Image (spheres, rainbow, N blue to C red):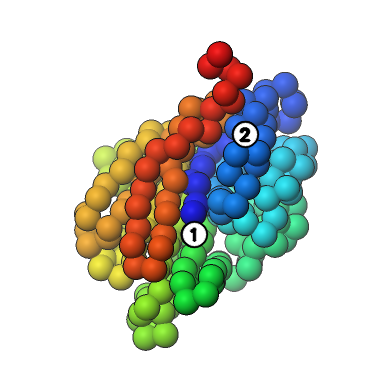
Amino acid sequence: MKFLHLSDLHFRSHPEYNRDILTTLDMIREHYPFHYLIITGDITDDGHEIQYEQAYQALAPFVGRIFICPGNHDFGAKGNLFSRERAERFDRMLAIPLQQRGTFSGDNLPVLHLLQEEEQQILLIALDTNLETLSPFDFACGQVGATQLTALNSLLSDPEISDMIVVVFFHHHPFLHTDPLRKLLDAKELMRILYKRVHLVLFGHHHVSKMWVNTLGIPYILACDNSPGKAIAREITIVQQNIAVQEVSIENIWDTV
């Protein structure tokens, strides 16, 4: 199975500001018709209803092969102050119509997707890392929270998943420990739970692309930049217990001629 990792699409209310991401998605749809897409949050710029409409129209052609989680810009105005209305809008206008296996604004449990081709089983675990801010001074920080951490720990302890490739994805960057405005508050607790128990961890938020190999007991940890207008994305290929990650073109070939 093959996957492309995208993040931080930031759909705006005015269509002219969405040209780059629309071009990128059109290119992926044409040239990677059998790849799964994992999008690690900030699909909209501030959770406005028009932005969700534009995002859904662009992502609907990928139904059945797209997996998403929310970012701070999806759940909060300017990405800084949590809004229950925006969070519920994410579920109503994206998660449910894009046929995700759960929602993110309710019980706050991990959303699970099990992919199977012949004897290959891959478990995708989507987390909501949005901090339900009480003050604008929380800025764009994130938090997994006790409910999700407990559920995640229990899930990863289940012997039934021992032969599966496990992919965990979320929005906030777990390694921004010294950034008081954007850090994941319980990153250490999360990474302790993931240590030597999963195969891939994917996230965005920082708009900087980076890859860590065999770090913290995890074969691949992938940080995605903001995808609109970018020339490359990471492709993940999983065959049985073998995982390969490489960069592939997502650029409109006519722009390079």
Up/down of 129 relative to 102, above or below:
above
Instruction: Identify residue for label 1.
Output: 1
Q: Residue at x 63, y 68 (%)?
A: 101
Q: Residue at x 31, y 43 (%)?
A: 211
Element assignment for label 2: helix
The percent coordinates of residue 226 (x first, y second) are 49, 34
Residue 236 is at least partly visible in this image: yes
Q: Amino acid at mark 2?
A: Met
Q: Quadrant of the C terminus?
A: top right
Q: Nearer the viewer, residue 29 or 83?
A: 29
Q: Amino acid at mark 1?
A: Met
Q: Residue at x 37, y 43 (%)?
A: 246
Up/down of 139 relative to 40, above or below:
above
The 10 Å Cα crowd at callout 2, few under 14, some 14 to 19, many 20 or more, is some
How many numbered discs sit on the rendered protein?
2
The percent coordinates of residue 53 (x first, y second) are 77, 42
The percent coordinates of residue 250 (x first, y second) are 53, 33
Q: Nearer the viewer, residue 30 or 74?
A: 30
The percent coordinates of residue 26 (x first, y second) are 67, 35
* Residue furthest top in the image: 257
| C-alpha distance separating marks 2 and 1 | 19 Å
Instruction: Identify residue for label 2.
Output: 27
The 10 Å Cα crowd at callout 1, few under 14, some 14 to 19, many 20 or more, is some
Left or right? Give the position of 81 relative to 242.
Answer: right
Element assignment for label 1: loop
Q: Residue at x 74, y 26 (%)?
A: 14
Up/down of 62 relative to 166, above or below:
above
